[in-house]
Amino acid sequence: MPPPYRTGTPSPFVVANALSPGSYVSCQSALSWHGVIPEGVKAVTSVTPGRPGIHTNPLGTFIQRHVKHSLLWGFESEPMPGGGTARVALPEKALLDLLYLEQEGGSPEYVRELRLSGHGELSRAILRQFAKRWGSPGMIRAAGTVIDELEGNGL
């Protein structure tokens, strides 16, 4: 809605969901939301069964990454500051989505660059379960790499 009729600025996550029906916020955006990575993220990344793309408007930059329909799970509706709800990946699913979508995502170097934080909620058991559900040996290996990195950092 135009500013004279709007009661407040919508959450970027709510906008991201509206821009791509069937999508959910994931990757670095969801990892930051859950406190799993220390950085704030300027653009909002969603995974979608639709076309990939980047949209910039006065409310921000919104990136849509394509995944097949069988990978559209592992998210919940979260209440957003300022009202409304948005579909946001669980931290384990956001991490696996990111590793899946990035070319070198499963490498130890890439996982180290994420600087995974002990402050967020990241369950090793759920990470293993989600990687198995993925049905890919590469994702099971990537989850193992993450777990090795977390344990190596004492998290």
Image: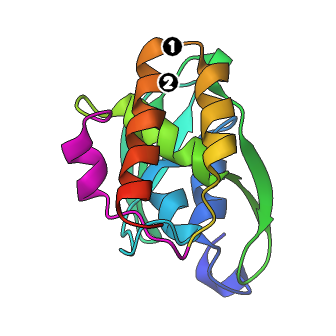
Which mark is on residue 136? 1
Please report the residue visible at 42 percent of the width from the left and 25 percent of the height from the top: 141
Secondary structure beneath dot 1 equals loop
Residue 129 lies left or right of residue 136; in this view the side is right
Q: Residue 56 in the image: x percent, y percent?
A: 36, 57
In the rendered image of this protein, does residue 67 appear above or below residue 3?
A: above
Question: At label 1, which amino acid type do we have?
Answer: Ser
Coloration mode: rainbow
Image point (64%, 18%), residue name: 69
Camera-nearest label, 2 or 1: 2
The foreground one among 17 and 33 is 33
In the displayed structure, would residue 148 be above or below residue 3? above
Foreground residue among 141 and 133: 141
Q: CA distance from mark 2 to mark 1?
A: 7 Å
Q: Main secondary structure of the magenta part?
A: loop
Q: Magenta segment: does it hold 110?
A: yes
**Residue occupied by mark 2:** 140
Q: Tell me which residue sits at (42%, 71%) in the image.
A: 58
Going 54% across and 58% down the picture, which residue do you hit? 30
Numbered mark located on residue 92 in the image: none
- Disc 2 vs disc 1: Cβ atoms closer than 8 Å? yes
Specify whether residue 45 is in view: yes
Secondary structure beneath label 2: helix
Quarter of the image containing the N terminus? bottom right
- Asked whether 84 falls inside the magenta stretch, the response is no
- Range of residues picked out in magenta: 105-119
Of the pair 45 and 154, the residue shown nearer to us: 154
Provide residue 88's location: percent of width, then percent of height: 67, 54
When the figure is inspected, residue 7 is found, relative to residue 72, above or below; the finding is below
Residue type at the position of mark 2: Ile
Quarter location, residue 135: top right
